[in-house]
């Protein structure tokens, strides 16, 4: 049953990806990308990776779609059709070949099968991580201090430095957006407040004068 | 979209519950799925929903950009500062075991504080990025107006 569900979800994902590649309507592409994220979040749930699924649903299907929509406001709703140097089906062929090669490598008898309990990751590393998580968090076994969510302990404590790096990446992304687009004229800070009040007072006509006001700030 | 009554009412009804859910995900991340990353995004989505329905200006009054910008750095500082606190108390960097009387409690506190730092930064970055993008259109239009000659209005 799980296999059937997985195959159905993967088929839906392939169809969605195909539709995204086909459409020239950017609004449709954005919405389909959100659907794609929701589908892969469902696959993560089936793989028992609930935390990852949660993140994918919130970030991929939620906030990314909204940010894309925000970017769409600044550009056209339709992509310009353009000619590919190798035709429409050349890149397609390359991608299909690459995908087939990746699937072929999983057929290697030495590779662990999907969901194999005897896979090296399950046999050696996972028990160590689980034991470490419990030992780190509650030395006396499952006491009041025991944190049941192993993902949280691994993420925040066992790999705390790694997660600090991830937060810094997000920090850098925010600072980058502010540095590129936010430089004072966006209506934050003093210039924006002045401009807003000017618009309230003088209606649309004063917009021209207040813009230079904001640019000076 | 402020003219749609249903959207307006539902958005106002939903927003507090979205924030509540974000806080649940934030502080329940040690017992269930969740944590700072997800909570931050959900928290930001409440403000983005509000901004979509009521307009960016209203949303800016609720979440002032200056506060959001400060929070971007604050979250990272909280995370890194927890590590430094561990060092000051005699442990290694980001070793939470020394934060309380016993290692178990220390780990729990450390993880909660660090996750809160993650949530603050993620929420602030998401809000800032959305406001910056959404506020960009008005800026561009005003700039176009500004470069037009005084009698150039008929060109539009």
Image (tube, coloured by chain):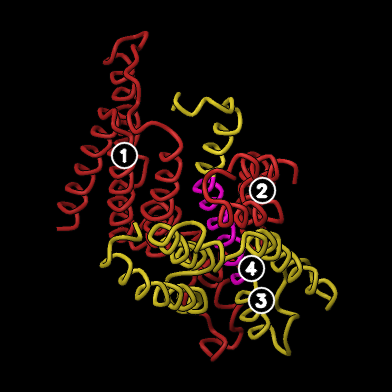
Chain colours: A red, B yellow
Q: Which residue is mark 4?
A: B117
Any mark on residue A27, and which? Answer: 1
Residue under disc 3 on the same chain as residue under disc 1: no
Both labels 4 and 2 in a single chain: no
Determine the chain carrying the residue at label 3: B
Residue at 49 percent of width and 71 percent of height: A150
Closer to the eye: label 4 or 2: 2
Residue farthest to the front, as pictured: B151
Q: Position of residue B59 (x, y in %)?
A: 50, 63
Q: Chain of mark 2?
A: A
The CA distance from mark 1 to mark 2 is 27 Å
Q: Position of residue B125 (x, y in %)?
A: 58, 56
Give the CA distance from mark 1 to mark 4: 34 Å
- What's the distance in space between the residues labelled 3 and 2, CA to CA? 26 Å
- Disc 4 vs disc 2: Cβ atoms closer than 8 Å? no
Which residue is nearer to you in this view: A169 or A150? Answer: A169
Q: Looking at the picture, how far across and down is residue A38, in whole percent?
A: 30, 53
Residue at the limit of the structure toward the top, as seen here: A85
**Quarter-wise, where is residue B70 in the image?**
bottom right
Give the crowd class for mark 3: few <14, some 14-19, many >=20 residues within 10 Å. many
- Neighbor class of circle 2 (other Cα within 10 Å; few <14, some 14-19, many 20+) is some
Work out whether mark 4 precedes mark 3 in sequence or the reverse, and give the earlier one.
3
Residue plotted at (19% across, 47% down): A7
**Residues under labels 3 and 1: Cα distance?**
43 Å
Q: Nearer the viewer, mark 3 or mark 2?
A: 2
Q: Which residues are magenta?
A: B115-135
Mark 1: secondary structure: helix
Whether the magenta-drawn stretch holds residue B126 is answered as yes
In the picture, the disc for residue B110 is 3
**Looking at the image, is mark 1 or mark 2 nearer the viewer?**
1
> The residue tagged with tag 4: helix, strand or loop?
helix
């Amino acid at each position: 049953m799980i296999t059937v569900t997985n195959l159905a979800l993967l088929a839906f994902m392939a169809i969605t990806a195909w539709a995204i590649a086909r459409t020239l309507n950017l609004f449709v592409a954005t919405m389909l990308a959100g659907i794609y994220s929701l589908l892969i979040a469902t696959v993560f749930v089936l793989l028992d990776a609930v935390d990852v699924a949660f993140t994918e649903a919130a970030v991929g299907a939620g906030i990314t779609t909204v940010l894309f929509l925000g970017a769409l406001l600044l550009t056209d709703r339709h992509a310009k059709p353009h000619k590919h140097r190798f035709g429409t089906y050349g890149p397609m062929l390359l991608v299909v070949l690459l995908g087939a090669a990746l699937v072929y490598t999983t057929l290697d008898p030495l590779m662990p099968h999907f969901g194999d309990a005897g896979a090296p990751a399950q046999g050696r590393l996972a028990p160590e991580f689980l034991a470490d998580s419990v030992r780190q968090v509650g030395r006396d076994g499952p006491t009041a201090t025991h944190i049941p969510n192993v993902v949280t302990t691994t993420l925040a404590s066992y790999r705390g430095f790694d997660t600090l790096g991830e937060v810094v990446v997000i920090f850098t992304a925010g600072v980058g957006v502010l540095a590129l687009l936010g430089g004072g004229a966006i209506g934050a800070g003093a210039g924006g407040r002045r401009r807003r009040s000017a618009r309230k007072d003088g209606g649309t006509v004063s917009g021209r004068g207040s813009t230079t006001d904001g640019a000076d700030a | 979209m402020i003219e749609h009554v249903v959207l307006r009412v539902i958005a106002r009804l939903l927003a507090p519950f979205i924030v509540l859910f974000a806080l649940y995900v934030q502080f329940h991340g040690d017992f269930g799925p969740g944590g700072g990353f997800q909570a931050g995004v959900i928290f930001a989505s409440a403000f983005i929903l509000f901004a979509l329905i009521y307009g960016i200006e209203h949303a800016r009054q609720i979440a002032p950009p200056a506060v959001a910008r400060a929070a971007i750095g604050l979250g990272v500082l909280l995370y890194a500062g927890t590590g430094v606190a561990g060092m000051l108390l005699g442990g290694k960097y980001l070793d939470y075991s020394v934060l309380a009387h016993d290692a178990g409690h220390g780990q729990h506190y450390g993880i909660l504080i660090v996750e809160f730092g993650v949530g603050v930064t993620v929420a602030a970055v998401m809000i800032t990025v959305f406001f910056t993008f959404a506020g960009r259109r008005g800026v561009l239009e005003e700039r176009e107006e500004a470069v037009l000659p005084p009698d150039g209005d008929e060109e539009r």
